[in-house]
Amino acid sequence: MDEKIKRLSELIHHSKNTVFFGGAGVSTESGIPDFRSEKGLYAAQKAYGHSPETLLSHSLFVEKPELFFRYYQENLIALHAKPNAAHLALAKLEQQGLLHAVITQNIDGLHQEAGSQRVYELHGSNWRQYCMDCSKNYTLPYILDEAHCKDKLIPICEVCGGIVRPEVVLYEESLDDTVVSGAIEAIAKADLLIVGGTSLAVYPAAGLLRYFKGKNLVLINKTKTPYDGEAQLCIHDSLGKVLGGISTL
């Protein structure tokens, strides 16, 4: 394992343009569960009567907003989560001029909290909320205050009375064109793409890999992915251990 970490460090230091693309596994080491895991699927079905994909769909949000917000607030918000070794290592690489951009499927804002500046959030962010009627922006604490909520669950705009929703991309909704374009451009220009903490099974995000035409693809994930055979370096281990190990070399 130490040899693979050393090899990764060499690739980063010899690369002119490195980009990191990460999934849920980046944040699980901060205590944020992966709701797509077998455990998450079972728990959601048992407690809410639906799969996470249904609970986080646009259809359910429109038809049963109270159920959506109950699941969302109880499962996707982790106010006390802190950046782990992977987040911190990526921020440090950017500060050193060794990492051009971070592309994430996560909505927890931990990359920014760790210090990363150039972050493309494909699925939006918990920390941004807005009124669906008048577009007034709100912070996450606002929707968690029962004083601002109908039936203690559905956040209501203080200006027009519309529903305040998270600026996250729900199932059945399209990704933000500006964010996707920025992510595609970053990947297309990279000569080293590091993919970590994702099974590369969720589309359209996983499809972004087809835009990579660079020399070196590195995959870091605890389990195998469909792209392992295409990578120049595969590491099946903890992302925090691997990326954190780079800074000690």
Image (tube, rainbow, N blue to C red):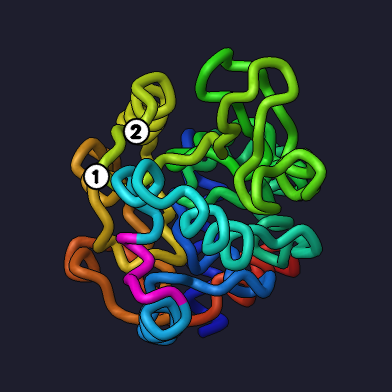
Seen at 65% across and 51% down, the residue is 151
Which mark identifies residue 204?
A: 1
Type of amino acid under label 2: Leu
**Label 1 vs 2, first from the N-terminus:** 2
Which mark identifies residue 192?
A: none
- Residue 1 appears anywhere in the view: yes
* Residue designated by label 2: 175
Q: CA distance from mark 1 to mark 2?
A: 8 Å
- Label 2: few (<14), some (14–19) or many (≥20) C-alpha neighbours in 10 Å: some
Horizontally, residue 185 falls left or right of residue 241, namely left
Disc 1, SS: loop
Disc 2, SS: loop
Horizontally, residue 5 falls left or right of residue 183, namely right
Q: Which residues are magenta?
A: 48-54
**Circles 1 and 2: CB distance less than 8 Å?**
yes
- Residue 192 appears anywhere in the view: no
